[in-house]
Image (cartoon, rainbow, N blue to C red):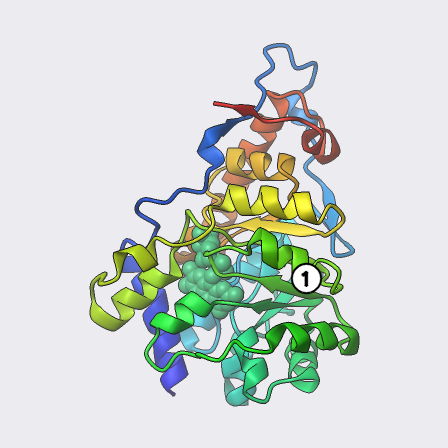
Amino acid sequence: MEIQTRKLKHVDICLQYEVNYQTRTTGFELYDLPYKALPESHLGHISTACTFLGKTLVAPLLIGAMTGGAEKSKLINQNLAIAAESLGLGLMLGSQRIMLEHPEVISSFSVRAYAPSCLLIGNLGVAQLNKGYGKSELIKAIESIGADALAIHTNPLQEALQPAGDQDFSGLLAKLASLIKDVPYPLILKEVGHGLSKALVTTIKDFGFAALDIAGAGGTSWARVEEYARYGEIKHLELTEWGIPTAKALLDARQVAPQQPLIASGGIRSGLDIAKALIMGADCVALARPLLAPALDSAEAVIEKLQDLVSELKIAMHCSGAKDIAALSALELCPV
Ligand SMILES: Cc1cc2nc3c(=O)[nH]c(=O)nc-3n(C[C@H](O)[C@H](O)[C@H](O)COP(=O)(O)O)c2cc1C
């Protein structure tokens, strides 16, 4: 199965190569949380609870979309699911195209037994809509694994650098607009780390997406992953450093779409990043690659990593005087 080999190669490259952007950063480092020396709060009483897509989360944090479709991916997804359920966080799965084309691998995506109540988000690539996928494939992806919602990823740069990658991204806006009306489940549009632009968010803000994941630059560069997969080295440096920094994409999206639920992702690496993203207007944040190695190890390793992030977030909230997520979102960042 060519698609399975490619997915496993992606996982190995993400573990073994330097696939983070080398020059471009998220932009979060340009801002500081307002530090309060007398915050009038108690660290032990800080609440990070929120609701997102109709579900209560212990913190506004999702495990980012990664994988599925092979034995190794099954282990990864099971450990991620156990961690999400035990901590009360959300889980985005990797692309389910392999599952729709090879139903025998569905067990690698079927994580509901491990995460009966967690916010579970399925995943498909938007380019498949130009290859015959439509309403029934989207509904099948959601219902066959008992997901709450489906993220549709758009990744023209990644596909352009992939041998035999999808090249036809034409006519997709119209297809998305009509699918949102036809599919009776929440749909999310996400990038994979090169960012949704202000212009694109302006165009799609009234389509009815349940959320947009701006997935900006500064974390994993999927252009770098594809270059390593294809050549074993980076041949097109400028292309691999191209993307809208996550903080910029988020601020722009919030400015042009004040009512649109937003997920911030792409290079979220600390509790402070999470706090800054929430102040900039994100409703939830997601991180992917930092959880890959822990997920291959054990559910406990994923839990430890996520607990550390939530604990950092609580410290950030306490020391800026925000007792809960609503108070945090109302703060203003200061330039560093
Ligand atoms: C191993 C791996 C596989 C991924 N596969 C998918 C995928 O199937 N679908 C998708 O939408 N995004 C996928 N992504 C992209 C992430 O969801 C995320 O948008 C991107 O890695 C940026 O976030 P990060 O900097 O926290 O890694 C994958 C990421 C990783 C690390």
**Count the marks: how many?**
1
Q: Residue furthest top?
A: 38
In-front residue for pair 192/119: 192
Image quadrant of residue 186? bottom right
Q: In the picture shown, does residue 268 fall above or below 31?
A: below
- The answer to whether any part of residue 143 appears in the image is yes
For label 1, the residue is 204
On the image, the x and y values in percent for residue 21 come to 34, 50
Image quadrant of residue 17? bottom left
- Residue ID at (42%, 50%): 290
Horizontal relation, residue 306 to residue 326: left or right: left
Q: In the picture shown, does residue 266 fall above or below 9?
A: above
Image quadrant of residue 116? bottom right
> Mark 1 falls on what kind of element?
helix
Q: In the picture shown, does residue 243 fall above or below 102?
A: above
On the image, the x and y values in percent for residue 126 come to 56, 74
In-front residue for pair 242/112: 242
- The answer to whether any part of residue 77 appears in the image is no
On the image, the x and y values in percent for residue 170 come to 55, 77
- Residue ID at (44%, 50%): 217
In-front residue for pair 331/74: 331
- Residue ID at (34%, 80%): 5
Query: Residue flagged by tag 1: what amino acid is it?
Result: Ile
Horizontal relation, residue 13 to residue 280: left or right: left
